[in-house]
Image: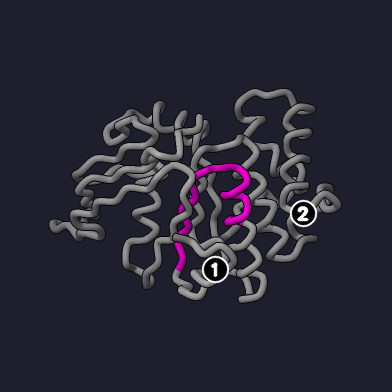
Amino acid sequence: MHTPHNTHFIRLEHITHAYATGASHHAVLHDVSLSIPAGQSCAIVGASGSGKSTLLNLIGLLDEPTSGRVVLAGQDMTRAGAASRAIARNRIIGFVFQSFNLLPRLNALDNVALPLLYRGIPQHQAREAARQQLKRVGLTARGHHRPADLSGGQRQRVAIARALVAEPSLLLADEPTGNLDSHTAQGIISLLLSLNRECGATLVVVTARRRHRRSHGALH
């Protein structure tokens, strides 16, 4: 499901999010509002503990705000039930994490195919789609390698291919270069930006590295 580029794919309205600590509550986010147009690339930059990942989890429907509204693709998801949120995550959102989250016993091809297999798509179709995404991230020759046999940058590319295999409208990347050296990190950011332009998916990246803003096609 893709939203026209002149509309706001993400809209947060007066979001507050607090964690209970004993008898008190600690507000991580307070009265945050933002709108991100469909197809845009956006970086959320800040120091550790500033609430970046919490904000991304709210956008990605992994958590609910204490107050405020979360609207994705025109749908108010603020108090959506667990089943509706899970369907939205599976259908329109792709996640890329700092720790890659690849299954060590599966090769790259089958790691990428997993989201489609969870949907019940036949294995041969899921694998063909996975091959296309590995080609897109430049890892055609590494499809039968397990994560332990790949470099950090290659593992993150596999994770990006997995996030894209279901053709999401929204790609969320939480510190995707946190475990990579600076040269490899720049390559991953450039790849995400090129995929954003190629696929038209809205891209939101959480990072503490301000220098990523100088990457090719800087994040807006």
Residue 207 vs 142, above or below: the answer is below
Q: Mark 1 or mark 2, which has the lower sequence index? A: 2
Q: Type of residue at label 2?
A: Gly
Q: Name the residue at 48% across, 73% down.
A: 209
Q: Observer-nearest residue: 153 or 7?
A: 7
Given residues 211 and 83, the one toward you in this image is 211
Left or right for 22, reference 62: left
Residue at left offset 52%, top offset 33%: 90
Q: Is residue 31 above or below residue 80?
A: below
Does 34 appear in magenta? Answer: no
Give neighbour class at mark 1: few <14, some 14-19, many 20+ (Cα, 10 Å).
some
Residue 159 image point, x, y percent: 64, 51
Of residues 20 and 186, which is closer to you in this image? 186
On the image, which quarter does residue 44 sit in?
bottom left
Question: In x, y percent, where is residue 162?
Answer: 65, 44
Image coords of residue 203 (percent x, y):
49, 50
Circle 2 sits on which residue?
A: 138
Report the quarter where the C terminus lies.
Answer: bottom left
Find residue 36 and name its label: none
- Is any atom of residue 21 visible in this view? no
Q: Residue at x 24, y 51 (%)?
A: 33
Q: Which residues are magenta?
A: 192-207
Disc 1 marks a residue whose amino acid type is Gly
Find disc 1 in the rendering and name its residue. Answer: 178
Check disc 2: other Cα within 10 Å, few if <14, some if 14-19, many if 20+: some
